[in-house]
Image (tube, grey):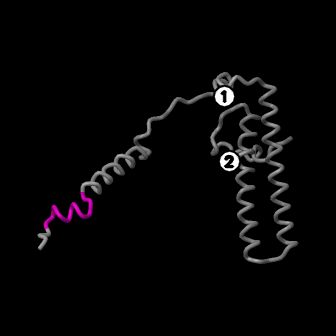
């Protein structure tokens, strides 16, 4: 007959591996703790421009591209809802349209934010962007 001891149960369950895995998870969690993250170097707009080697003409072209993509996303959002109301009111169509709307909103946010940074020539935060409603809708 097999004698069941703590050592036998530990071997069957894999106690050593469980302890090692718990220790690894604990060290990863410590790395993700916001209190342990050291602030990085803060880069200014001109430093970023120099590092990326872009001139003002290229920046203006990029701003226009971001503004255009913003407006393309707006147009596709309206098309999606127009088709949605034209086709009918099924649950699947509604879920598909809502999902598509989230994608359009994400594109609109990203490109509006980038266009505003290029327009202002400043690397501002999302909080600053959200506080200035004049930057929300880029002009072409």
Residue situated in front as seen by the camera: 86 or 105: 86
Total numbered labels: 2
Q: Which residue is mark 2?
A: 130
- Residue pictured at 78% horizontal, 25% vertical: 56
Is the C terminus in the top left, top right, bottom left or bottom right quadrant?
Answer: top right
x and y percentages locating residue 91 in the rendered image = 73, 76
Q: Label 1, label 2: how many angstroms apart (C-alpha)?
A: 19 Å
Q: Which numbered disc flags the more N-terminal residue, 1 or 2?
A: 1
Label 1: which secondary element:
helix
Is the N terminus in the top left, top right, bottom left or bottom right quadrant?
Answer: bottom left
Q: Which residue is mark 1?
A: 45
- Residue pictured at 65% horizontal, 27% vertical: 48
- Which span of residues is magenta-colored? 5-15
Q: Residues within 10 Å of mark 1 (few under 14, many from 20)?
A: some
Q: Is residue 89 magenta?
A: no
Left or right of 83 on screen, residue 7: left
């Amino acid at each position: 007959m097999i004698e069941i001891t703590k050592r036998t149960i530990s071997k069957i369950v894999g106690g050593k591996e469980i302890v090692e895995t718990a220790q690894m998870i604990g060290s990863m969690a410590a790395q993700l703790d916001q209190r342990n993250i050291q602030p990085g170097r803060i880069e200014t707009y001109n430093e970023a421009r120099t590092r990326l080697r872009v001139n003002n003409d290229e920046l203006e072209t990029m701003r226009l591209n971001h503004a255009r993509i913003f407006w393309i996303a707006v147009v596709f959002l309206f098309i999606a809802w127009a088709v949605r109301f034209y086709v009918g009111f099924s649950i699947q169509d509604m879920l598909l349209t809502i999902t598509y709307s989230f994608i359009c909103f994400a594109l609109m946010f990203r490109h509006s934010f980038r266009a505003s940074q290029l327009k202002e020539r400043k690397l501002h935060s999302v909080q600053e962007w959200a506080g200035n409603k004049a930057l929300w809708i880029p002009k072409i």
